[in-house]
Image: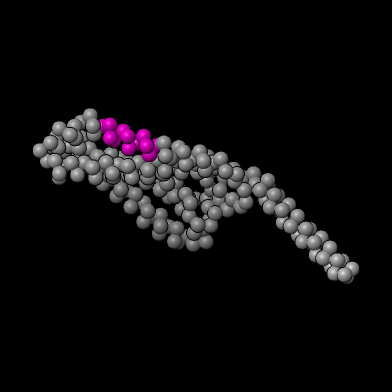
Amino acid sequence: MEWYGMVWMIFQTQSGDLLNSRYKKNNMERTNWTESEFILQGLSEYPRAEKFLFVTCLVMYLVILLGNGTLIILTLLDACLHTPMYFFLGNLSFLDIWYTSSFIPSMLIHFLSEKKTISFTKCAVQMSVSYTMGSTECVLLAVMAYDRYVAICNPLRYPIIMGKALCIQMAALSWGLGFLNSLTETVLAIRFPFCGKNVINPFCF
């Protein structure tokens, strides 16, 4: 019995020391994280692939700007397109421009720069803008679905129901809900403690 008790005491002591060392190591990793920026590795080891992706993403971004910008301009200039459907399509095009502009320009810069870093503040702002555009798009698509529902089910009353004031209110509601949802998620996210390594292997622009 004495031999068993001594073995048990040694086991408890070693287990306790191991747990304490791991706890101290985790605390050191958490408390020693003082970096104010993230390092984005991406495809740093493949410069040719980065150049190819730069050209591809640049062309796609220019097409997005050209297509959505053309739709917005035509909607504003052509009086025949001053209808609820094209009003919401104009909002969607404007949203798409902001959505892609929140990360593609910085991504293109990182493809060509040697220092691939992003500050914590810039990351939070980029996340907030992306959340705002994504949430607004979801609500705006629901509004556009309601607009088509009224146009199909109540074609004679459609101009009366979907008046200019209601369209503006529904668009404003979409942007407002998207902003509130983004603000809530961003505030909750930045309140968490950020610890550990600040090197990010996958793409995060």
Dominant secondary structure (helix, strand or loop) of the stretch shown in magenta = helix
| Image quadrant assignment for residue 143 | top left
Q: Is residue 114 left or right of residue 28?
A: left
Front residue of 5/38: it is 5
**Residue 135 in the image, given as x and y percentages of width and height:** 37, 43
Residue 28 magenta-highlighted = no
Q: Is residue 191 visible?
A: yes
Who's the residue at 52% across and 43% down the image?
189
Quarter that holds the N terminus: bottom right
Q: Is residue 129 left or right of residue 194?
A: left
Q: Is residue 204 above or below residue 84?
A: below
Q: Is residue 66 left or right of residue 150?
A: right
**Residue 173 in the image, given as x and y percentages of width and height:** 32, 34
**Residue 16 in the image, given as x and y percentages of width and height:** 78, 58
Looking at the image, the residue that sits furthest to the front is 1
Who's the residue at 28% across and 44% down the image?
142
Q: Is residue 115 visible?
A: no
| Image quadrant assignment for residue 146 | top left
**Residue 81 in the image, given as x and y percentages of width and height:** 16, 38
Looking at the image, the residue that sits furthest to the right is 2
Tell me which colouring the rendered structure shows.
Answer: one colour
Front residue of 43/157: it is 157
Front residue of 161/135: it is 161
Who's the residue at 71% across and 53% down the image?
23
The number of numbered discs placed on residues in the rendered structure image is: 0
Who's the residue at 40% across and 59% down the image?
52
Front residue of 61/126: it is 126
Residue span colored magenta: 168-179
Looking at the image, the residue that sits furthest to the top is 165
